Amino acid sequence: MALDFSHYQVVVQAKMDAVSAASTLDDLVTLAITTSKIKDAIAVSDVQAAAAAGVTSITGAATGALQDITTARTSATGAIGTARGGALTDIEAARTKAIQDVQQAGGGANAAGGISFAPTGQIAATNVQAALAEVDSEKTAKASNLSDLADPKAARANLGLEKFTARGDAAYTILAGDRTVALTAALTGPRVFTLPAASALNPGATLRIMDQAGGISAANTLTIQAAGTDKLNGAAAAVFAAPYTDFLLTTDGVSAWTYDVQSLARGGTGATTAAGARANLGLGSAAQLTAGVAGGAATLDGSTGKLLAAQIPDALLGTVRYQGGWDAAANSPTLAAPSAANKGAYYIVLTAGTTALAGPKGSITDWQVGDWAVSDGTYWEKVDSSDQVISVVGLQGAITGPALKAALAVAIGDVAGLQAALDAKAAASYATTADIWAGTDTGKIVTAKALRDAQVPQTLAASAAPAWNAALGFNARITLTTNTTFQTPTNLVEGLTYVLRAKQDATGGRTGSYTSAFNFGADGPPTLSTAANAEDALTFLCVDAATPRLSFVGIKKGV
């Protein structure tokens, strides 16, 4: 819409055209006053658009006119200044209001072009239109900025504050302009994202890296690599193996990046390395599966699901440990001197021999098949498991009458009265098991059967303190019906081995204790099996029949 400035133009233009080098001071004063009065007579709505567009040209023209009369104005500066100042103040106020109306109305270049203003003097219409076009351009730019601010999302995007970069299953070098880098696909192998130089961003600038697809795994890790010599939490790189990892990095603007390591209180480890994480979480070597070695974890048998015997402490297995067979003739394997290291170790003789081992009462040299060599940590002790006679005129083993006679090589005539005695002799008699137990020194034949039967255990009466008469059997057995204290056996023979078999009744859980005659050493007495009907065999060596004293050799559980 064009504003009608015809009245204003005619009057003002006429006054301006009248200004020349010959104009007097009175003419100029009259021009200023007239202009002011004409302005008051014009409706503000008619002046608003034209004033905004033409004020620059009008001011220029007025300045040109004033320059022409500089000399004349000097003598009347005060009067002219007062009159001109009032006029300019009124024109400036109208101009300001016109600019505001133009901006609000959006008249733009079209409105400026439609203004009817064609001065015939020194003011060119093109100057006014150019001024209005510039105002319109500034107004349009301002409107665009206001539009951005009215939409914060668009404003942030225009400023590059929220640049989102999606990356798939491939390595990527992150750009300095990236702000969020998201992994949007599952990884099929380890991948590396390389950071921009820390110095490429301002101090405090942040970069977010996130696994949006949950594509990271222990096998397919994501490594964040610092550029050049830059550091990432003090290291050259960081490796992430958990899906949906999401973290924020901050640069110092020089050579370092930092990112948050979650504390224990927030579900993290407070560490950036596996070793540090284990230490912070209090995990030991068992967590690293250092199994089957010192300081590690015990392992289970793959078929039975039970602990391997080699990994069970000796204290849980008992006081003796079977090491295998031993050749007493060749000392194979070679038995080391007794020590704490081999305490409880025992070997069973497979080949008889005379290898000397240090015993509690001197060297032991008589080793028969089935004997045990047991280390107590100080001495080697022998558990005599053979049934041969120690020695009879050089004979050992089961001694028969013919063998004995041949060994003796005594003729009947060599013995006075022997023939008569033989003629009058009664039927031959044989030693009984009781004779063997008692050691009866009579002329009776000792047979293999008698020796065998002598090994049959006697049955002790069940009680809390059962008596054991060794003259009724070297070996004994008892069924425990209550907690039992085993009494000192009577009629012991030094050097003989005694075996006690203790069996739980159908109830089980019975305990066993012993008098001071039983010597169990530093390890103390063994614990009996407690299961119902469970049976254990305890072996003792009589080392002193007078005191008496029985030395514990070992226990066999579950016989």
Image: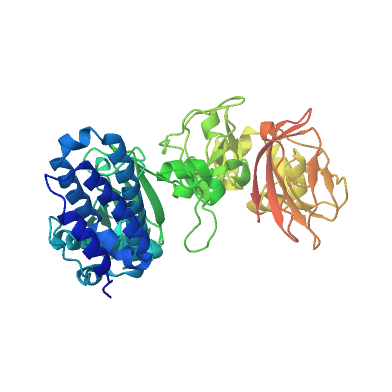
Q: Is residue 325 visible?
A: no
**Quarter-of-image position of residue 228:** top left
Relative image position of residue 253 (x, y in whole percent): 30, 39
Relative image position of residue 72 (x, y in whole percent): 18, 36
526 and 234: which is toward the camera:
234
Q: Is residue 395 left or right of residue 474?
A: left
Extreme residue in the top direction: 362
Q: Is residue 243 visible?
A: yes
Instruction: Decide: is 11 above or below 437.
Output: below
366 and 242: which is toward the camera:
242
Q: Quarter of the image containing the N terminus? A: bottom left
214 and 428: which is toward the camera:
214
Q: Is residue 514 left or right of residue 94?
A: right
Color encoding of the figure: rainbow
> In percent of the image, x 78 and y 28: which residue is there?
546
Relative image position of residue 160 (x, y in whole percent): 30, 57
> In percent of the image, x 47 and y 40: which residue is there?
294
Instruction: Decide: is 535 above or below 349.
Output: below
